[in-house]
Amino acid sequence: MKLDLLAIVAHPDDAELGCGGTLIKHAALGYRTGVVDLTAGELGTNGTAQTRAEEAAAASQLLGLQVRANLGLRDGFFANDEAHQLAVVRAIRQYQPEVLLANAQADRHPDHGRAAQLVADACFLAGLPKVQTELNGQPQAPWRPKNLYHIIQSNYLKPDFVVDITPYWEQKMQAVYAYKTQFYVPGQANTPTFIATPEFIRFLEARAREFGQAIRTTFGEGFQTNKQLGVNNLFDLL
């Protein structure tokens, strides 16, 4: 299935937290969107791989995704090596996204930065004809997305650009709350963790408001890029 926009991230809920509003917005604009989770998030203090999969499926409906897949890599222990790079190359070639989103390049959770580099390396390798991969016994054609952007997660990183998600903020938060075992939900008996507290939810809103304020709107999601951005039309800018 050919996608326009694909997020490849370490854990189920990374995409919802970091670029959920952007995914919803582009689906509403008619683009085909998807998420590939590298792991099942099985090391999370709360929930299980099974509950995370069920929650991801519910969140995917709210995000308006065409595709939600999981590569089944080991949470906490995947590496940026040939085997893992080829697994990501297969996913990129399978869905052929024009734009690829990945984890934050540096963050509190070590999986995030490692996943960011893994996806960046695989993005380059996916465009090389001599890197050979197969899907269902058939050779895959080379494919390299036009652009790769990194979300911003727990650590503050200065964004290279911000997407206005104001009309989609409530829907994004519904997708976040689909992960009932991961976040603070009144009446839900989750063990308190970094993300399973009322303070984290307030932080999430504050960060979105901070990025939104920077572009003179209410809510925003920030992204970083490793290459110079080009502009065709000055009137496309907010």
Image (cartoon, helix red, strand yellow):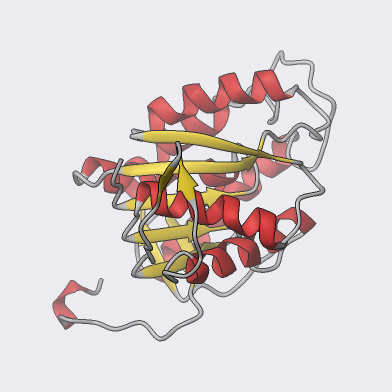
Horizontal relation, residue 4 to residue 234: left or right:
right
Q: Nearer the viewer, residue 133 or 121?
A: 133
Residue 182 in view of the camera? yes
Horizontal relation, residue 123 to residue 156: left or right:
left
Residue at point 43% right, 65% down? 213
Residue at point 57% right, 61% down? 119
Q: Nearer the viewer, residue 102 or 185?
A: 102
Q: Quadrant of residue 238?
A: bottom left
Horizontal relation, residue 170 to residue 74: left or right:
left
Q: In the image, residue 130 lies at what x, y percent? A: 47, 70
Residue at point 30% right, 40% down? 1
Looking at the image, is 151 positioned above or below residue 51? below
Q: Quadrant of residue 39?
A: top right
Q: Nearer the viewer, residue 49 or 181?
A: 49
Q: In the image, residue 17 lies at what x, y percent? A: 56, 45
Residue 165 in view of the camera? no
Q: In the image, residue 146 lies at what x, y percent? A: 34, 70
Residue at point 47% right, 58% down? 101
Q: Quadrant of residue 49?
A: top right
Q: How many marks?
A: 0
Looking at the image, is 179 positioned above or below residue 34? above
